[in-house]
Amino acid sequence: MLAARLVQIIESHPEDLTGGAIQDLQRNPLTPHYHYLSYQELRSRTYSVYLSLAECIRRGNEEMIATDFSDLAVCRYSETFPLAEVVAALTATKNHLFHFVQTSGMVDLPVELRQERELRDRIGSFFDKAIFHAVKAYEDKLTPARLPGDVKAA
């Protein structure tokens, strides 16, 4: 199964995955705050996103997405990274992973093409949820605390 192979690659060959994503974050005009981080810091941050994906695939635990990416957003908020850059960084990390899956030779046989599509769907869903929880946590830091049920009409 491709998902199991991806988990194995994430855990055993992190440089294969993180290298391209780090270069993108260092050069991407949408992520200027990331340009000032060291290679090691970017590697650690990128690898933690991929490890979270691997755990989600392995265990099917989606609650951890909320926890991991809420924590990530609170950290970026405290570092004064703009929310748009956090989203751009997560999107770039996802796109690099899609590119890696397509070009790494993970898909050898025609029968695996369907599995590749399923894997892309799982990765996309993971990152959609990650971005949602990151944005929600970041916005929660921006918005003064409200009482439950205190909803203002638009």
Image: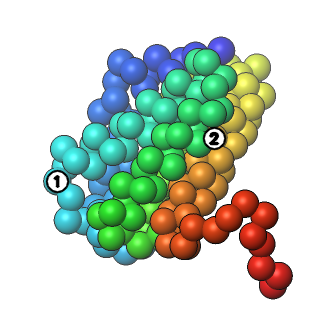
Q: Is residue 126 above or below residue 70?
A: above
**Which residue sits at x=46%, y=17%?**
8
**Res 57 quadrant in image:** top right
On the picture, is 107 further left or further right than 75?
Answer: right
Q: Measure the alpha-carbon separation of dots 1 and 2.
A: 26 Å
Which residue type does callout 2 highlight?
A: Phe
**Which residue sits at x=63%, y=41%?**
126
**Which residue sits at x=59%, y=42%?**
66
| Within-10-Å neighbours for mark 2: few <14, some 14–19, many 20+ | some
Total labels: the figure holds: 2
**Res 125 quadrant in image:** top right
Rendered-image quadrant of the C terminus: bottom right
Structure colour scheme: rainbow
Residue 53 picture location, percent across and down: 53, 33
Q: Is residue 153 above or below residue 91?
A: below
In what element is the residue under mark 1? loop
Q: Is residue 90 above or below residue 104?
A: below
In what element is the residue under mark 2? helix
Q: Nearer the viewer, residue 100 or 12?
A: 12
**Residue situated furthest front in the rendering:** 147
Q: Nearer the viewer, residue 147 or 79?
A: 147
Rendered-image quadrant of the N terminus: top right
Q: Are marks 1 and 2 in contact (CB under 8 Å)?
A: no
Q: In this view of the protein, can residue 130 be seen by the observer?
A: yes
Which residue type does callout 1 highlight?
A: Ser
Q: Which residue is mark 2?
A: 126
Q: Nearer the viewer, residue 8 or 129?
A: 129
On the picture, is 30 further left or further right than 15?
Answer: right
**Residue situated furthest bottom in the rendering:** 154
**Res 46 quadrant in image:** top left
Q: Which residue is mark 1?
A: 38
